[in-house]
């Protein structure tokens, strides 16, 4: 059994194995309908419990499809429906119950410590479905999408992020170390990645490149990533923050600075950070990106259940 909490803590060779498995499985099920299981139903009879303390469309639906396509099933809960969410039960007791009824637990939470506390008390794997510090299932799936479109290892590509220093970027930074790719970040001075993340990169003898001019960050890029300026439950002055990011809004002109076939990716939901004609334009692959969550999460589930081929 393995947990999937933060890309930083997962060996590179395991992350690569997950991507390879996803590639094989995606190819093999081309002719199958959405809910038909993969050959051999490797997670037959297994149940994934997913709990959301914050809203979700893609993570929730893609995990439902992922476990279904492996032959298992899922139960989706909102935390406020549980005794735990209403303050009437401890994490330890809830974890014991989840481990009794279920085989895996996916949690989207506002509190990284909660994931660690659950991990301590669960006897089943836990998957981080987005926390303040990371969104690992999203970013691993994004690596898969980049390599699928570019048809080369991500280590040979220049990746650029324009936007807020948030959970998705923190996972992308972790991925840049694990997969050895060049990552340039375009963000306002006030919104650079946190010291802890930067120290971790240094400790691993790697570098990230931070610019306060989006054009400089995008120079020669093969991929531009972005995300909302205001994340879920972000407790900031929203109007002020959006204004501070005005210069970083992604417009068509940015592709004058990138490589010719530069692609645009965005995890969704989207906000004001990208113009409609970019989001829906020819460089954008956001729908393929969303679909790939299913394929990669299947291999993440297999990894957690100790069933990766
Ligand atoms: N990208 C992503 O995680 O989307 P949801 O918030 O809809 O799950
Ligand atoms: N950074 C965003 C990602 C949403 C999938 C958030 O945390 O809300």
Image (cartoon, rainbow, N blue to C red):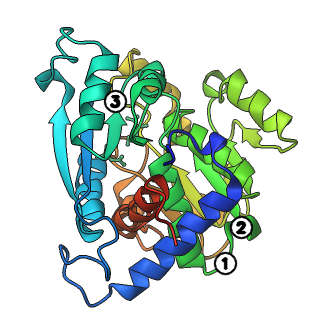
Q: Is residue 170 left or right of residue 202?
A: left
> Which residue, given by chain and number where applicable, does mark 2 sit on?
157
Residue 52 vertical position relative to residue 45 in the rendered view, above or below: above
Residue 92 vertical position relative to residue 263 in the rendered view, above or below: above
> Which residue, given by chain and number where applicable, does mark 1 sit on?
152
Give SS at disc 3: loop
Q: Earlier in the sequence, mark 3 or mark 2?
A: 2
Residue 68 vertical position relative to residue 198 in the rendered view, above or below: below
- Of residue 39 and residue 289, the one placed in the foreground of this image is 39
At label 2, counting other C-alpha atoms closer than 10 Å, the crowd grade (few under 14, some 14-19, many 20 or more) is some
> Which residue, given by chain and number where applicable, does mark 3 sit on?
232
Residue 49 picture quarter? top left
Q: Is residue 199 left or right of residue 212?
A: right
In the image, ligand 2 is in what quadrant? top left
Q: Where residue 294 sits in the image (x, y, percent)? A: 34, 64
Q: Residue at x 38, y 59 (%)?
A: 279
Does the closest atom of ligand 2 sit within 8 Å of the Cβ of label 3? yes
Residue 109 visible = yes
Does the closest atom of ligand 1 sit within 8 Å of the Cβ of label 1? no
At label 1, counting other C-alpha atoms closer than 10 Å, the crowd grade (few under 14, some 14-19, many 20 or more) is few
Q: Residue furthest bottom?
A: 31
Q: Where residue 133 sits in the image (x, y, percent)? A: 52, 30
Q: Residue at x 26, y 41 (%)?
A: 50
Residue 56 visible = no
Residue 41 vertical position relative to residue 172 in the rendered view, above or below: below
Q: Where residue 255 sits in the image (x, y, percent)? A: 59, 64
């Amino acid at each position: 059994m393995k947990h999937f909490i933060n890309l930083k803590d997962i060996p590179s060779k395991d992350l690569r194995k997950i991507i390879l498995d996803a590639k094989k499985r995606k190819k093999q099920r081309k002719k199958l309908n959405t809910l038909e299981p993969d050959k051999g139903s490797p997670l037959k009879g297994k149940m994934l419990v997913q709990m959301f303390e914050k809203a979700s469309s893609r993570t929730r639906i893609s995990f439902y499809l992922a476990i279904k396509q492996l032959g298992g099933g899922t139960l989706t809960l909102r935390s406020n429906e549980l005794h735990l969410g209403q303050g009437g039960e401890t994490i330890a007791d809830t974890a014991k119950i989840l481990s009794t009824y279920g085989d895996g637990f996916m949690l989207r939470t506002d509190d990284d410590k909660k994931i660690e506390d659950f991990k301590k008390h669960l006897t089943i794997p836990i998957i981080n479905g987005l926390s303040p510090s990371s969104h690992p299932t999203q970013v691993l799936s994004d690596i898969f999408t980049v390599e699928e479109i570019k048809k080369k290892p991500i280590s040979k590509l220049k990746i650029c992020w324009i936007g807020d220093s948030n959970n998705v970027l923190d996972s992308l930074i972790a991925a840049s170390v694990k997969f050895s790719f060049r990552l340039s970040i375009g963000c306002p001075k006030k919104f650079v990645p946190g010291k802890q993340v930067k120290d971790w990169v240094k400790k691993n003898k790697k570098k990230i490149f931070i610019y306060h001019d989006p054009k400089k960050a995008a120079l020669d890029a093969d991929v531009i990533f972005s995300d909302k300026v205001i994340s879920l439950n972000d407790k900031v002055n929203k109007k002020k923050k959006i204004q501070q990011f005005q210069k970083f809004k992604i417009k068509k002109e940015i592709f004058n600075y990138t490589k010719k076939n530069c692609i645009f990716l965005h995890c969704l939901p989207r906000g004001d950070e990208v113009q409609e004609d970019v989001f829906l334009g020819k460089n954008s692959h956001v729908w393929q990106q969303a679909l790939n969550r299913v394929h990669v999460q299947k291999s993440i589930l297999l990894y957690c259940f100790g069933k990766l081929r």
